[in-house]
Image: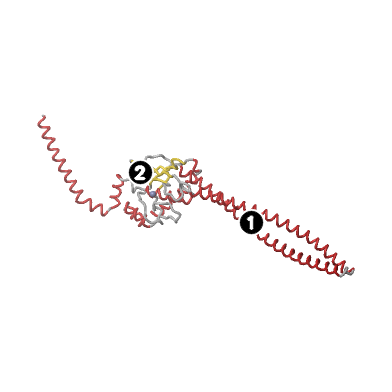
Amino acid sequence: MKIRKLLKSNHGGVLTTLILAGLIFIALTYLPAYFNNHPEIKNYIISWFDQTCVYPKTYELVSIDPRFNLSTSTLRKNLNIALTAWNKKVGTEVFSLTDTPSTKSIKLSFVFDERQSSTLTMKTIKNSIDSGKEDYTSLKTKYELAVANHRQLLSDYNQIFADYEARGKKLEADISYWNRQGGAPKDVYNNLNLEKTSLNELTQTLSEKARVINALVVEINDLASALNSLSKNLNLEVNNYNSSDLVGKEFEEGLYTLNGGKQDIKIFQYDGVIKLQNILVHEFGHALGLDHNISEQSVMYRLNTSKTQTILVSDIENLKKLCPVLDKVMAQ
Ligand SMILES: [Zn+2]
């Protein structure tokens, strides 16, 4: 019994081995050629094992730290703009939002730390600098007007004073002349008296003008010291701004990670909606499998600079290298 069974199973083993060898032979001979003619089937099979080129990729909004002060609806609006950019360039829906939690989905979250905290502080300082600059400009205009006014008043004063001095000297000379003559005729005497009264009145006008000018000098000095302290404050604020941890330094604004099939996008910092959209396009680009692009114009450039960041033809070419099936999709 034992021998028979052994023999029987040996026969079966040989048969199975032969069939398997035949199948492997057929597969090795014909499959490469078949896959060459039908790359979509090859890619479909590959996609069973590798999820890289399977679209649409679903993503979930996991959490937004409230300190970002970013509402879900605002985020959705910006996500829509950012991901429509990919969908349009690729020509198919590559990303779609889902509310159903799944291990396959990309998990998007906004993580608040010193990066965004510094950004918010810097924003406050910048606003204060801007309004300080406005105050400074309007104060400077006031100062310049006061200085111009002072110059005009002083010139008027000097002119009147010169006239006053000349008339005073003439009056003195006339009086001593008529004194030497032993007295002036009545009409001359009256005229000399009128001139004396007029000069006395002019003294009052001059002292009133001098009072206005002196008050203006005090105002000008006050304005100058206000300008000085404002300028010092501005310098301090500008220094504060420039010494911030973020100015001129490189740091991660967002991060895409793929760990054991688990995909995460974490956003740490952004300043304004344009930067937010750029980061989203960038990190979701990584989720497509893309690496950084060396072109500064590309949204996949390693830094989020102020230059217009777009999805370049080279980014799509890189994506096609990664997922040849896209060539077919895009040709349609
Ligand atoms: Zn990156």
Q: Which class describes the residues within 10 Å of circle 2: few (<14), some (14-19), or many (20+)? A: few
Percent position of residue 286, x then y: 37, 48
Residue depicted at 45% across the width and 44% down the height: 115
Q: Are marks 1 and 2 in contact (CB under 8 Å)?
A: no
Residue named by callout 1 = 143
Q: Which image quadrant for residue 329?
A: bottom left
Instruction: Indicate the secondary structure of the residue bearing disc 1.
Output: helix
> Nearer the observer, disc 1 or disc 2?
1
Q: Nearer the viewer, residue 273 or 133?
A: 133
Q: Which corner quadrant holds the N terminus?
A: top left
**Is residue 58 found left or right of 16 in the rendered image?**
right
Q: Decide if residue 36 is on the left or right side of residue 289.
A: left
On the image, the x and y values in percent for residue 309 come to 43, 55
- Position in image of residue 80 (x %, y %): 45, 49
Q: Nearer the viewer, residue 288 or 120?
A: 120
Question: Of the residues under marks 1 and 2, which one precedes in the sequence?
Answer: 1
Task: Give the CA separation, mark 1 to mark 2.
Answer: 62 Å
- Please state, as top left, top right, bottom left or bottom right, where the C terminus lies in the image: bottom left
Q: Amino acid at mark 2?
A: Leu
State yes or no: Cβ of the residue under disc 1 lies below 8 Å from any atom of ligand 1: no
- Which residue is at a point 37% across and 40% down the rendered structure image? 103
The residue singled out by tag 2 in the image is 258
Q: Is mark 2 within 8 Å of ligand 1?
A: no
Occupied quadrant, residue 2: top left
Q: Mark 1: which amino acid?
A: Tyr
Q: Residue furthest left?
A: 3
Q: Residue at x 25, y 52 (%)?
A: 35
Q: Secondary structure at mark 2?
A: strand
Q: Number of labelled discs?
A: 2
How packed is label 1: few (under 14 Cα within 10 Å), some, or many (20 or more)?
many
